[in-house]
Image (cartoon, helix red, strand yellow):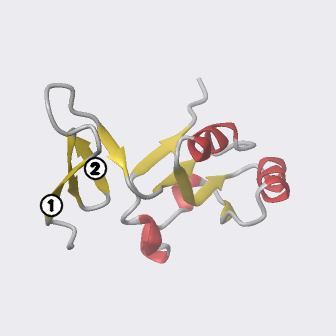
Amino acid sequence: MGDRESAVFGDDEGNATKKRGNVEFAEGRDRVALPTSRLTSLEICAGAGGLALGLERAGFDPVLLLDNRPIACETLRANRPGWDVREIDLTAFDPFEDQQVYDVHLLSGASLG
């Protein structure tokens, strides 16, 4: 089934769901999107990773985490060695050099202020 194709499924209780790409929708009045695979995120100003950890628990896998503070990046790398953590000023980040961020499902980040 391609990304643009959809299919309808039923469960044992007669409730129908419709699948489009990697998202499954419940049919009926209360329509809810149910992901059928993990989603991806790009996190800017990642800090020590609190938001990224919460997103991980919610079903997101970070493709890339950016922060300009060495201690924050060291903490992230120590706690999640499999994550791609970059110590870089956000204004110096060029997405053309990291094209894996083009198709993320969520752009997340903290705000100072």
At a point 85% along the width and 57% down the height, the residue shown is 78
Amino acid type, mark 2: Glu
Work out whether mark 1 precedes mark 2 in sequence or the reverse, and give the earlier one: 1
Q: Which mark is residue 70?
A: none
Residue 24: x, y in percent? 28, 50
**Which is nearer the eye, 14 or 90?**
14
**Which is nearer the eye, 2 or 108?**
2
Against 39, is 14 above or below?
A: above
Q: Is residue 18 left or right of residue 49?
A: left
Residue 31: x, y in percent? 21, 32
Name the residue tied to disc 1.
6
Residue 66: x, y in percent? 62, 55
Assess disc 2: are there few (<14), some (14-19) or many (≥20) residues with their C-alpha within 10 Å of its C-alpha: many
Assess disc 1: are there few (<14), some (14-19) or many (≥20) residues with their C-alpha within 10 Å of its C-alpha: some
Q: Secondary structure at mark 1?
A: strand
When asked about the image quadrant of residue 13, the answer is top left
Residue 44: x, y in percent? 56, 48
Q: Which mark is residue 24?
A: 2
At a point 44% along the width and 48% down the height, the residue shown is 107
Against 25, is 77 above or below?
A: below
When asked about the image quadrant of residue 1, the answer is bottom left
**Which is nearer the eye, 9 or 112?**
9
